[in-house]
Image (cartoon, rainbow, N blue to C red):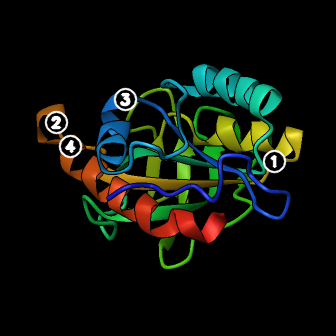
């Protein structure tokens, strides 16, 4: 399958959406299926994604951004390899009075929505969240500051209490790629 951009010049009536992905491992299935997909690698963790997202907004002026990657589920009603849309993010390590919820600006159609916990290490509990990742809150905060609509799509690779050897990274990255291929034409 090949990604077909609307046009090289990006006419004024078309929206320019970029897909931000933390690692090349997570991006590889999408790159293989759609070599021309508008993917940018942004790094792992809050600092890396905040810096990269800021640079991308300043240099490339996208109309909207989608952060896509893997996540761990703390709620077993969310299946391993399920792809979900994140409605909101919190930073787990911040104390209650500083625990801001960063809401996604749009939710891709057809995906279950969840609340997520952005953390620096796996297994940090946060009430009311179903999944965790290491980048989402920083990404949504930068999108908010710059007024660029942001959405987050995650494929669950593991449960947070699973040993790393049980994580299904490649399979979840494949499912993520298939979902991005399905939803991206909605955002042209």
Q: Quadrant of the N terminus?
A: bottom left
Q: CA distance from mark 2 to mark 3?
A: 22 Å
Q: Residues within 10 Å of mark 3 (few under 14, many from 20)?
A: some
Task: Give the mark, 2 or 3, whose residue is nearer the N terminus.
Answer: 3
Q: Residues within 10 Å of mark 4 (few under 14, many from 20)?
A: some
Residue 24 numbered tag: 3
Q: CA distance from mark 4 to mark 3?
A: 11 Å
Reading the image, the residue beneath label 4 is: 170
Q: Is residue 170 visible?
A: yes
**Relative image position of residue 148 (x, y in whole percent):** 81, 47
Instruction: Tell me the mark number nearer the camera, choosing from 2 and 3.
Output: 3
Badge 2 vs badge 1, beta-carbon distance below 8 Å: no
Badge 1 vs badge 4, beta-carbon distance below 8 Å: no
Q: Toward the viewer: 28 or 139?
A: 28
Number of labels in the image equals 4
Q: Residues within 10 Å of mark 2 (few under 14, many from 20)?
A: few
Q: CA distance from mark 2 to mark 1?
A: 37 Å
Residue at 60% over, 71% down: 186
The quadrant where residue 142 appears: top right
Q: Toward the viewer: 184 or 139?
A: 184
Q: Secondary structure at mark 3?
A: helix
Q: Is residue 45 left or right of residue 53?
A: left
Instruction: Tell me the mark number nearer the camera, choosing from 4 and 3.
Output: 3
Residue 63 numbered tag: none
Q: Is residue 40 left or right of residue 139?
A: left
Task: Give the mark, 1 or 4, whose residue is nearer the N terminus.
Answer: 1
Reading the image, the residue beneath label 2 is: 163
Residue 154 vertical position relative to residue 85 in the rendered view, above or below: above
Residue 148 numbered tag: 1
């Amino acid at each position: 399958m090949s990604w077909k951009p609307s046009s090289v010049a990006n006419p004024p009536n078309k929206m320019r959406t970029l897909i931000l992905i933390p690692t090349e491992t997570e991006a590889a299935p999408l790159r293989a299926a759609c070599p021309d997909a508008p993917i940018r690698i942004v790094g792992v963790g809050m600092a890396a994604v905040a810096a990269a997202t800021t640079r991308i907004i300043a240099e490339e002026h996208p109309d909207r951004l989608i952060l896509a990657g893997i996540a761990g589920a703390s709620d077993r009603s969310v299946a391993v390899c399920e792809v979900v849309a994140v409605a909101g993010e919190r930073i787990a390590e911040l104390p209650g009075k500083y625990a801001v919820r960063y809401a996604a600006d749009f939710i891709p159609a057809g995906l279950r929505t969840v609340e997520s916990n952005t953390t620096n290490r796996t297994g940090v509990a946060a009430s009311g969240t179903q999944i965790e990742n290491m980048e989402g809150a920083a990404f949504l905060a930068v999108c908010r500051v710059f007024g660029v609509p942001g959405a987050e799509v995650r494929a669950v690779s593991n449960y947070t209490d699973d040993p790393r050897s049980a994580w299904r990274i490649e399979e979840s990255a494949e499912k993520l790629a298939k979902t991005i291929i399905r939803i991206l034409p909605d955002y042209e």
